[in-house]
Image: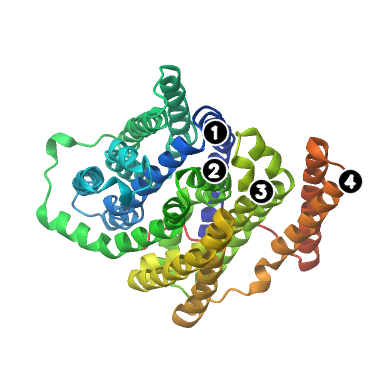
Amino acid sequence: MERDSGSAADAGRMILRGAQATAAGFGGRLAARLLFLFVAGRMFGPGPFGAYVLAVAAVELAVSVGSLGMKKVVFQLLDADGGTGGARPLPHVLLDSALLVALASLGLAAAIMASAWSLPRSWLPGGAAGALIVLAPMIAGQSLLDLFLAATRWKHAIRWEVLARSIVEPYALLLGAAAAWALGLQAEGLLIGYWCGTLAALAYAVHGARRTFGGFRVSSWRGDRRVLGATLRASSANTATDLLNALYTRVDLWLVGLLLGVPAAGVYGMAKQIAVPIRQVRQSFDGLLIPLVSRTLAARGSQGSGEALASATRLILVIQLPLLVALYAAGGTLLSWLGKGFGAAYWPVLALAAAETVQAAFSIGDLVFVYLKPRLGLWLTLASIGVGIVAALLLIPKWGVAGAALSVLAAYSVRAIWRSVVLRGRFQLDVPHSHHAGPFVAAAFGAAAAAAGHRLAEGVVGDALALAAGLAAYGAILFLWLRLRHETLKLSGFTAEVPA
């Protein structure tokens, strides 16, 4: 028992160190994002930005297939060889995975380029086809980037992902787009920036993986058909789940583009970009959370992992919800600074931010499906996509971009409810809802305080007053809730040991 307690404490500290390391780069990444959005909004406008975000959404959807689910499956492959003394060297396991990912993603990129070139232009929103042809090769870049960064996380070397995602990729994208605009490449500037960001981050990630694994031993590596086939089979169900998850988060943007046009997609894309930092709170934990959830499930099973998943969910909610309060207080002013026409994104931003909060915090439960019953997770995701598409088709014609955002919130909320029901019934993983009530109550009081601040003053002064009042109320209510329940925000229930 003492050993289990020590392992749980070590795992909790490990996750927090990884999250703290990622949070250290969060400020740099957020600053780069805001600068990029300012450049995209002010210099390029809703039209070119709309074509860019539609093409990026398609590329990222394709990455979910081209990556073959390896950013999760690679942990199982490395655990199998690293935990049981497998005969195949770990660098060769990584190279096997990289070969499969490269072949799959390059083939997919070629197919997408051919389709975008041959389809009638009337079938796609204006400018999206050309942008997709330019960006399609970066499917391979992003897929390999995910794989090599996942490999460094398996070694608990989180700094490589922090620097790649928080510094190298966003600032290379920003500099590439700004340089292209200065050279007069206004239509292609954002696309050039995406190439720059992806290739710079990939080069850094490969260097990091090589350093972390002590070299790749390329001269002695030979791809084994049996190993490659087994790896591909192991990734098939999770690849399908990743595809559906990616479709789930991007179909709304394409529906806006198809139903309302590229400029509306630009406004909606800006709203999604503003809401992304809330998702990144969860991603800051994923570096070490995902491999440790894999080990905890392998060591203790689903019934013994409830405490771990619950403590992680609550901590992520505690960090996410003040960001939602801050957007409510000052989001309108922020959007007005990004250029003409983007002020219409305020209410969509709030709906999308709420949706990201629900999905990012409670989707930790999806890892149970990934590692124990991937096909069940696949069906759950598919059903949720259906809810989102139906809601979007009903709400977008009536309420425009706000309707699209509400459809996402509805779909994520329904999925969270279904996920909870399935985890309780199928895996006996029971997390009391009262465990998460405190952060939501604190956020409600924070929003009320922010609304009161807006009534006392207007303009930038009103936003500042609302922001200060909202965050202060949130912190006070959360502190009071923790004291009354005699609880802490400490992570618990994880194991850091590789199961034998």
Disc 4, SS: helix
Give residue 368's position: percent from left, percent from top.
43, 68
Element at label 3:
helix
Q: Which amino acid does label 1 sit on?
A: Gly
Along the polypeptide, which appears first: circle 2 or circle 4?
Answer: 2
In the rendered view, does 256 fall on the left or right side of 441? left
Residue 254 versus residue 38: which sits nearer the camera?
254
Q: Check disc 3 and give the amino acid type.
A: Leu
Q: Which residue matches tag 2?
A: 270
Q: Determine the residue positioned at 56% across, 62% down.
A: 398
CA distance separating discs 3 and 2 = 17 Å
Task: Residue at 70%, 61% (x, y): give it.
Answer: 439
From the viewer's perspective, tell me whether residue 314 is left or right of residue 425.
Answer: right
Q: Can residue 3 be seen in this view?
A: no
Q: Check the image and name the residue furthest to the right.
A: 456
- For marks 1 and 2, give the CA distance: 8 Å
Mark 1 or 4 closer to N-term? Answer: 1
CA separation in Å, label 4 and label 3: 22 Å
Q: Residue 177, located in which quarter of the rendered image?
A: top left
Pointer 3 residue = 323
Q: How far apart are marks 2 and 4 (CA)?
A: 29 Å
Residue at image mark 1: 41
Disc 1 is placed on an element classified as helix
Residue bearing the label numbered 4: 456
Which amino acid type is marked by label 4? Answer: Leu
